[in-house]
Amino acid sequence: MKEAAVLIVEQEALIRMESVDIVKDAGFTALEAVDADEAVRILDIRRDIRVVFVDVKMSGSMDGLRLAHAIRDRWPPVHLILTSGLSVTNEAELPENALFIRKPYSADQVTTALYELFSYPGRIGGVSRLYQSWRQISPQLARVSV
């Protein structure tokens, strides 16, 4: 797993730093971006990014939801984990094949989500069949039989 990189896109410095620590402790390479524009620049350069962990609410040229859709269109094999402290009410607006973890999240939730994404060999569009549709993961990962 160490060759797989996770890009954390989070405006809040303390939350971003904590997320970086969680990802590193899980055995992955952690990269950081403050906003969507920086995330896109990093994705253009780095071919080893397998997961983008993004906050839904961000200011800038696009919020985290729009970024997630852009990633899904431009880099379909990249896994998406979205997070927010707000409740997500309209699932139709959410990207297909993404995971959701509600803030505040624990290190165990993030680590479990990362391991789940890499544990299942049956992938469709780069995403495990386990997550064919949006799943809210709070407090534990939603499980769907494969």
Image: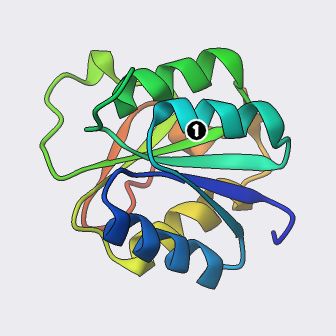
Residue at screen point 44% across, 30% down: 133
The vertical placement of 131 against 72, above or below, is: below
Apparent side of residue 98 relative to residue 74 in the rendered image (left or right): left
Residue at screen point 72% across, 54% down: 120
What is the x, y in percent for residue 19?
Answer: 45, 69
Query: On the image, which quarter does residue 130 sit in?
Result: top right
Residue at screen point 39% across, 21% down: 61
Query: On the image, which quarter does residue 44 sit in?
Result: top right
Residue closer to the observer: 5 or 140? 5
Residue closer to the observer: 62 or 116? 62
**Residue that badge 1 annotates:** 39
Question: Which quadrant does the N terminus fall into?
Answer: bottom right
The vertical placement of 88 against 13, above or below, is: above
Query: On the image, which quarter does residue 46 sit in?
Result: top right
Residue closer to the observer: 67 or 35? 35
Within 10 angstroms of label 1, few (less than 14), some, or many (20 or more) residues?
A: many
What is the x, y in percent for residue 43?
Answer: 71, 36
Amino acid on which the number 1 mark rests in the picture: Ala
Question: Which quadrant does the C terminus fall into?
Answer: top right
Apparent side of residue 40 relative to residue 80 in the rendered image (left or right): right
Residue at screen point 59% across, 63% down: 114
The vertical placement of 1 against 54, above or below, is: below
Element under label 1?
A: helix
What is the x, y in percent for residue 53?
Answer: 50, 50
